Amino acid sequence: MNTDRPSIMGILNVTPDSFSDGGEFNSPELALQHALQMIEEGADLIDIGGESTRPGAEVVSEQAQLDRVIPVIELLKENIPEKILMSIDTTNSAVAEAALKAGVHWINDVSAAEDSPQMLALAAAQQCPIVLMHRQGISVTMQDKPQYSDVSQEVVSYLRQRAYVALDRGVSASNIILDPGIGFGKTFEHNLTLMADLMSLVELGYKVLLGTSRKRFLNEICHPSSASKLAAATCATTTMGVLAGVAIFRVHDVLENRQAADVTWKIKKSTQRCG
């Protein structure tokens, strides 16, 4: 992966119920086709998930996740360029371990490795990057009535603590990636506050991943006819993220966000040189 510019993580949901693209890529062949399209559009990383983490989503069994993701991972490994990395979006350490054996390079855990305590030991043993995300509550209930005294301070404090735990379990600092969890147990106002204060998370010194793609808070601002029409809105958040120092952007619309990230990055670098 090119570490000099922001990285784009393309979302590949092999689920029937994800909020935006559920059911679209359920066969390995369709998943491969979409992955190749995202790579052509500029994705550095493909994030493969077999369990929806949308608000209200039910837990999917370990076996069901494996049945969905392993054939896709194996097919992608045979057909995508070696420079393109893959990640597994799961909170189940057994699924993550099987996915790593099948060919993925990263773990993306929306529970910050709290659902499966073995997850951090696995990441340490495999010396692989792991995304630790903030989530208040669990997917089924997280949007019921999320409350914070100071959402930015609480999210940063929580992720700092989870990073310390990861370090203690043997994960190297360079392999720890923090995600503020936009939309995961947050109200509209909470999401706006976190977006405005991204730099406070970046200042912890770890890589930061931002996932805002097509999310509900954007819908509440823009009121599109469908979530698939929120590419431009997502690009606005990508631009803000690049300016704040975010390293990785998890998106559905790769081409548009690749362009937004690259243009912002070039302007930011030019300004830094001039300064």
Image: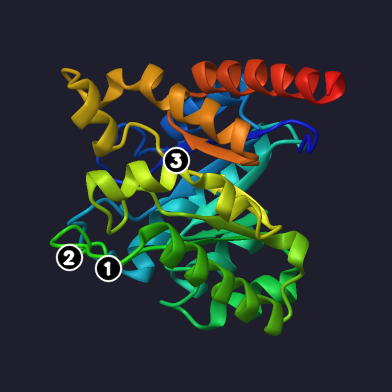
Q: Tell me which numbered mark, 1 or 3, is placed earlier along the sequence.
A: 1
Q: Amino acid at mark 2?
A: Thr
Q: State the residue in front, 197 or 264.
A: 197
Q: Amino acid at mark 1?
A: Ile
Q: Label 1 vs label 3: CA separation?
A: 25 Å
Residue lying at the far front of the rendered structure: 275
Quarter of the figure with the C terminus: top right
Q: Mark 3 highlights which residue?
A: 196
> Going 47% across and 33% down the picture, which residue do you hit?
251
Q: Mark 1 highlights which residue?
A: 138
User: Residue 249: horizontal and vertical position, in percent?
Assistant: 55, 37
Q: Amino acid at mark 3?
A: Ala
Label 2 Cα crowd, 10 Å radius (few <14 / some 14-19 / many 20+): some
When the figure is inspected, residue 253 is found, relative to residue 114, above or below; the finding is above
Residue 85 visible here:
yes
User: Residue 257: horizontal and vertical position, in percent?
Assistant: 52, 22
User: Residue 92: horizontal and vertical position, in percent?
Assistant: 44, 71
Q: Mark 2 highlights which residue?
A: 141
> Going 68% across and 57% down the picture, which residue do you hit?
206
When the figure is inspected, residue 22 is found, relative to residue 168, above or below; the finding is above
